[in-house]
Image (cartoon, grey):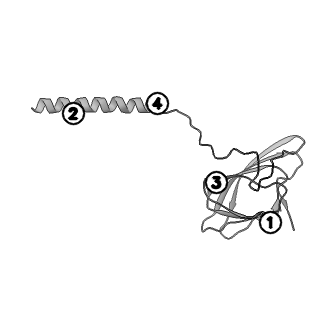
């Protein structure tokens, strides 16, 4: 009886190992988790690239709790991805939006807005500016 149980146990382990191996072999080595695919900004504007020699800038922007970006605008497309914290952005007549970790956005173009860290921890954003040489990525507004 003991030999029979041992044989069943070994058979179960072999089947389990083969099944696990088959599942692992089917897992692709690279995967894509799409976060944003759009042709418009967060307020519905068409995305328009600046003329001139292209210049791409990638930055991690950190905003401390309670701090604000100040009113500003972008004349170049900006893609943002919230890594940590939260950010509330006031777009004036176009409303207010709250962004949290994992949120991706195509920022408003040529529209004044102000972002404030309304959370308790620093907000970290990955910002990709699709600009052009000689064109500011961000311009403060009064």
- Nearer the observer, 45 or 26: 45
Q: Is residue 139 above or below residue 11?
A: below
Q: CA distance from mark 1 to mark 3?
A: 22 Å
Report helix, strand or loop for mark 4.
helix
User: On residue 93, which mark appears?
Assistant: 1
Pointer 1 or 3: first along the chain: 1
Q: Quadrant of residue 140?
A: bottom right
Please name the residue shown 85% across and 56% down the image.
110
User: On residue 103, which mark appears?
Assistant: 3
- Disc 1 versus disc 3: nearer the observer: 1
> Do labels 4 and 2 touch, CB within 8 Å?
no
Task: Locate residue 112 relative to residue 22 in the image: left or right.
Answer: right
Q: Residues within 10 Å of mark 3 (few under 14, many from 20)?
A: some
Pointer 3 or 2: first along the chain: 2
Report helix, strand or loop for mark 3.
loop
Q: CA distance from mark 4 to mark 1?
A: 50 Å
């Amino acid at each position: 009886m003991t030999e029979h149980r041992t044989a069943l146990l070994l058979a179960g382990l072999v089947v389990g190992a083969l099944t696990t191996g088959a599942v692992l072999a089917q897992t692709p080595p690279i995967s894509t988790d799409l976060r944003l695919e759009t042709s418009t900004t967060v307020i519905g504007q068409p995305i328009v690239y600046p003329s001139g020699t292209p210049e791409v800038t990638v930055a991690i922007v950190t905003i401390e709790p309670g701090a604000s970006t100040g009113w500003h605008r972008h004349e170049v497309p900006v893609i943002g991805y919230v890594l940590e914290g939260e950010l509330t952005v006031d777009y004036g007549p176009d409303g207010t939006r709250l962004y949290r970790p994992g949120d991706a956005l195509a920022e408003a173009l040529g529209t004044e807005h102000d972002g404030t860290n309304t959370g308790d921890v620093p907000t970290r954003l990955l910002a990709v500016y699709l600009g052009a040489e000689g064109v500011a990525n961000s311009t403060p507004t009064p």
